[in-house]
Amino acid sequence: MFKPFKPDLTAADVTPQSMWLNRRQLLAGGAAALATGSIARPTRAETLAPNTLEEITSYNNFYEFGTGKSDPVKYAHMLTTNPWEVKIDGMVDNPGTYPLQELIGDLDVEERIYRFRCVEAWSMVIPWNGFELNKVLEKVGVQAGAKYVAFETLVRPEEMPGQRGFRSNIEWPYREGLRLDEAMHPLTIMATGIYGEPIANQNGAPIRLVVPWKYGFKSIKSIVRITLVDREPPTTWNMLQSSEYGFYSNVNPQVDHPRWSQASERVIGGGLFQQRKDTLMFNGYEEQVASLYDGMDLREFF
């Protein structure tokens, strides 16, 4: 098991390959067993210092539990995550509703220490445990003509108070989507743990998406449905306010949110006198993912 430690926020940005701890995580009855997994992919030969487990699990956006940062940790204990099923449909060879253990039981789970950048201009560093999304898509077989992957979060208002009545103007379920090449990229993972432990409810238990070069709202939590489609799918924040939240939502310090700058970010855990940090293009993963957007005007395609 991983032991949380206080981050050194003056450290450089990414763990070198020699420091990655590969793990295989099998979920059964709410517990996780760890064994050796496959090789992870760092972005630079530098050191990334993760936030503490307490910081990661106590400062969250998860509107299904409320709009405040402390609402998820306050209410997420009500969520039942075992058993859990994920429906996979659309343009796939093997559609069906898969028990989570069946879906991921033979996949290698490894640690990925990624920067996490919220569109609200704050950031963390999180040691996820997960597996590449492309492995799941390969298992179900992507049909020719599929161009996008759509995701949906659980709807269970009796356990998720943020979904009840007047508490939110969101049209549930929460929806997100990726272009197929983004979904197949090796940096895109499905996370089932943090610090070697099963992922906490407030962080998106039992399975969530992590796309480290995009703003955090793209990394949809508590996934119950994955659909392969041939057209750009609707996404929740874009549906709510398209002028502020685009489909792509790649981290770009040169493109401000209409109500605040994205040029810098507040590092969670940095203390009262911690200076803001310059935001990196694609959240620091430019070398790995910039080619996905060749020919696109990144100022236009937010």
Image (tube, grey):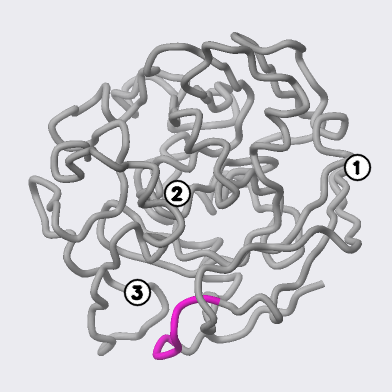
- Relative placement, left or right, of 101 versus 111 is right
> Quadrant location of residue 117?
bottom left
Mark 3, residues whose alpha carbon is within 10 Å: few (<14), some, or many (≥20)? many
Mark 1, residues whose alpha carbon is within 10 Å: few (<14), some, or many (≥20)? few
- Can residue 10 be found in the magenta stretch? yes
What is the distance, in whole Å, between disc 3 and disc 2 at their CAs? 20 Å
**Residue for point 64% across, 24% down:** 224
> Quadrant location of residue 268?
bottom left
Q: Is residue 144 above or below residue 291?
A: above
**Residue for point 51% across, 62% down:** 58
Q: Main secondary structure of the magenta part?
A: loop
- Relative placement, left or right, of 292 versus 96 is left
- Residue picked out by circle 1: 28
**Which label lies toward us, 2 or 1?**
1
Q: Position of residue 165 (x, y in %)?
A: 38, 19
- The magenta segment is 9-14
Q: Position of residue 264 (x, y in %)?
A: 20, 69
The circle on residue 71 is 2
Q: Secondary structure at mark 2?
A: helix
Q: Position of residue 285 (x, y in %)?
A: 42, 61
Q: Earlier in the sequence, mark 3 or mark 2?
A: 2
Amino acid type assigned to the residue bearing label 3 in the image = Val
Cβ atoms under marks 1 and 3 closer than 8 Å: no
Q: Earlier in the sequence, mark 2 or mark 1?
A: 1
